[in-house]
Image (tube, rainbow, N blue to C red):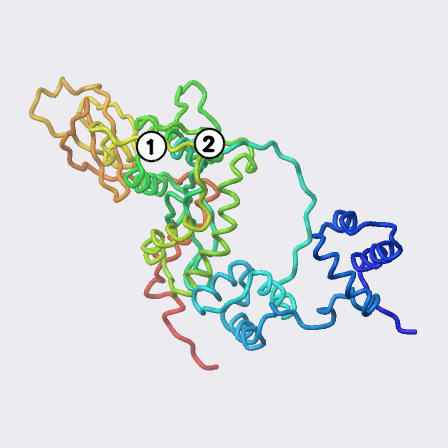
Amino acid sequence: MELLEMSKKELSRVEIMERIRAEKMTQKKAAETLGISVRQVRRLRKKYAEKGSVGLQNKSRGKPSNNRLPAKTRQEAIDLLHSHYADFGPTFAHEKLVEKHRLKLSSGSVRQIMISENLWAPRKVKKIVAHQMRERRACAGELVQIDGSPHRWFEDRAPACTLLVYIDDATGKLGELRFAKSESFFSYAEASRAYIERHGKPVAFYSDKHGIFRVNQPSVGSGENLTQFGRAMQKLDILIICANTPQAKGRVERVNLTLQDRLVKEMRLLGISSMEEGNAYMPQFMEDFNGRFAVIPRSNNDAHRPLLLTDNLDQILTWQETRIISKNLSIQFNNVVYQIQTERPTYALRKAKVTVCLSADGNVAILYKGKELAYTIFKKQAKQSEVLSSKDVDRKVDKVRKHYKPAADHPWRRGFSSP
């Protein structure tokens, strides 16, 4: 007795054909039950009458699929994955195989090949932690999430650095990417300037509670509740909102992980090995990234605002502190005594309040009622211990070590004598 391998669908068709042959069911009713046409029922009835149950069996069972990946294409993909994309994810590797090497295969095929070649392991589904969902903003420019991501972006080709990321909440578009040595006021000022000059002023920046954006320990009685970056953004009429948890600004947190995968490998393929080369490549990368992952906002209105004539970025994006001019027309800033030079009567400037502006390149301007005062440097005082945040300690130590040179009589310079 021959045993037939049949599916549930085929077995149900055998039962229907038996009922039709026994005149217990009409062809029209059989078509409705099987979800096919009456014409197809007639064909199935004819096959059943001629060959029995064998006539209803799927003829493709046991045969290779017509959509099977050609052996040549599969072998080319395996060779390229091992030689170029061994640490890529399946989706990213599929993009490169299709775009750079013109292979015709699906991302699912690449995934299965990488699993079989032990190049990628399927991740276990993590336990889902429920967080309150927040709908995207309706207009581009209403809310821009910003964050710094320290990472070995150039792998072993250059020291670790920080990538400043600006992403629009409504569209998911990257608005600015910039490499910096660390998260600092001047690095964020430079990145924000590039963003504003390219897109305009957004309504709000959405950040974490880093000390650059928020005064976490306000001085008692000082009345100062703005950081230098907060003061600059207030001058530009840009609101700063600090998230209470990382999950609250999940869009920029997730894109940081994506960039740590995609951007690192893109720069490896292009041989980019420095922050300068990386910053020059960012516009090209952002255009490609936004073309792949950006979404259409609910509203076509753009909430970005143009710069006003009064928005002097050269002055606003400087480190500013207030000083009181002494009786001898001098002030002290960063352990340097500045002597004010003026042709007006000296008593006019005594006890006057001035603003000292320090730019990223170290230039100092002293402003009195919005106008710049001439000065000379009287003397530099001895440098005292410096107060740094935890994120800036490594940068400062590396900078000091880089400039250290052993003395002329240091044992390293004497050489080694044989015993």
Q: Dot 2, how many residues are within 10 Å of its Cα: few (below 14), some (14-19), or many (20+)?
A: some
Q: Which of the 4 quarters of the picture holds residue 87?
A: bottom right
The quadrant of the image that shows the N terminus is bottom right
The disc, 2 or 1, on the residue closer to the chain's N-terminal end is 2
The percent position of residue 133, horizontal first and vertical second, equals: 58, 33
Q: Amino acid at mark 1?
A: His
Report if residue 228 is visible in the image.
no
Q: Which of the 4 quarters of the picture holds residue 307?
A: top left
Label 2 residue SS: loop
Label 1 residue SS: loop
In front here: 316 or 83? Answer: 83
Q: Dot 1, how many residues are within 10 Å of its Cα: few (below 14), some (14-19), or many (20+)?
A: some
Residue beneath disc 2: 137
The percent position of residue 15, horizontal first and vertical second, equals: 86, 56
* Residue at 60%, 31% in the rendered image: 132
The percent position of residue 55, horizontal first and vertical second, equals: 78, 67
In front here: 384 or 160? Answer: 160
Report if residue 296 is visible in the image.
yes
* Residue at 19%, 22% in the rendered image: 369
Residue beneath disc 1: 304
Q: Amino acid at mark 2?
A: Arg
The percent position of residue 274, horizontal first and vertical second, equals: 36, 59
In front here: 298 or 302? Answer: 298
